[in-house]
Image: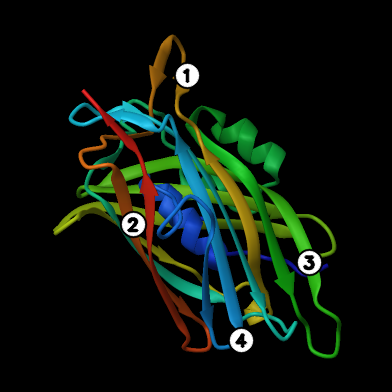
Amino acid sequence: MRGVHMRKYVLLLCAVGALFAVAAVGIAGAAGGEGPVTVRVGEMELTADGGFAPKALSRTKQTPITIHASGEVQMRDGGHPPAIREIIIEADKAGEAHTKGIPVCKSSQLQATSTAVALKTCRSSLIGEGTATAQVAFAEQRPINVSSKLLLFNGPEKNGKRTWYAHAYFSNPISGAIVTTATISKIHHGRYGTLGVIKIPQLVGGAGSGISFTLEIFKSVKVGNKTFNPISTTCPDGKLKVHVLGHFEDGTQAETEIIRACTPKG
């Protein structure tokens, strides 16, 4: 078995990473409509989809929402896709992330742990879950797809920057834990008010690439007798926007603006 150990990233993985990151900062959607958005760069094709509920939202009052996100990357010629190394997200200023009161999980508590151990150690910090699939292509071998449950945990806040951790554990035929980090901060850039930066180290010495994921960020989490809402938003003008930029191992860049409609009320 080959060990897999990765620090610093959220969501993980290519179009995969792109949408996970979008979800991590609170808004997910599809450019220009309600269906998935596909971006083609050379032979690479990235498809992202997602949404939130409820759709009817106050114009002025923050309303808790559930986030659903998914993504997939593939090569049109059937080859092995390059790995994503960095994702930069600018999210609509209408959305907010709220983690005060939710217990904090440390990266060190998740490293080299199985899904079961990660949940046992940091269950009170869990704010989302889904699935992740990576493709590993060793020299002179057919690519191997490996899948895992994906867990999203609340991390520490420092100097005004919030941290979330995504944990995945692959057990067969590649074994090991992947712990990636999303750093979230406030910005003032026109329509956008939240910045998410995800740095993604090499997977399996550069042989691995993320190819798909699904993720749900919970509308609410319970801690003892208290209920917390990790994500909320308003709907001032009937739409929410996110700008996503991904940098890949081979120098490729993929960029898109993601828009999702909402219904203003009040």
The tag earlier along the polypeptide, 2 or 3, is 3
| Residue wearing tag 4 | 43
Q: Residue at x 78, y 66 (%)?
A: 145
Three-letter code for the amino acid on which mark 4 is drawn: Glu
The answer to the question of whether label 3 and label 1 lie on touching residues, with beta carbons closer than 8 A, is no
Question: Where, by quadrant of the figure, is residue 208 drawn?
Answer: bottom right
Of marks 3 and 1, which one's residue comes earlier in the chain?
3
The residue beneath circle 2 is 242
Disc 3, SS? strand
Q: Position of residue 176 (x, y in %)?
A: 71, 59
Q: Residue 47 appears in which quarter of the rendering?
A: bottom right
Q: Amino acid at mark 3?
A: Asn
Q: Nearer the viewer, residue 52 or 210?
A: 52
Mark 2 neighbour density, 10 Å: few (under 14) some (14–19) many (20 or more): many
Q: Nearer the viewer, residue 128 or 192?
A: 192
Count residues near mark 3 (Cα–Cα under 10 Å), then give few for <14, some for 14-19, many for 20+: some
Query: Pointer 1 and pointer 4: residues touching (CB < 8 Å)?
Result: no
Above or below, 112 against 222 in this view is: below
Q: CA distance from mark 1 to mark 4?
A: 45 Å
Task: Provide the residue designation for mark 3.
Answer: 145
Label 4 sits on a secondary structure element that is: loop
> Mark 1 — residue?
222
Identified by mark 2, the residue type is: Val
Closest to the camera, between mark 3 and mark 4, is 4
SS of the residue at dot 1? Answer: strand
Q: Nearer the viewer, mark 1 or mark 4?
A: 4
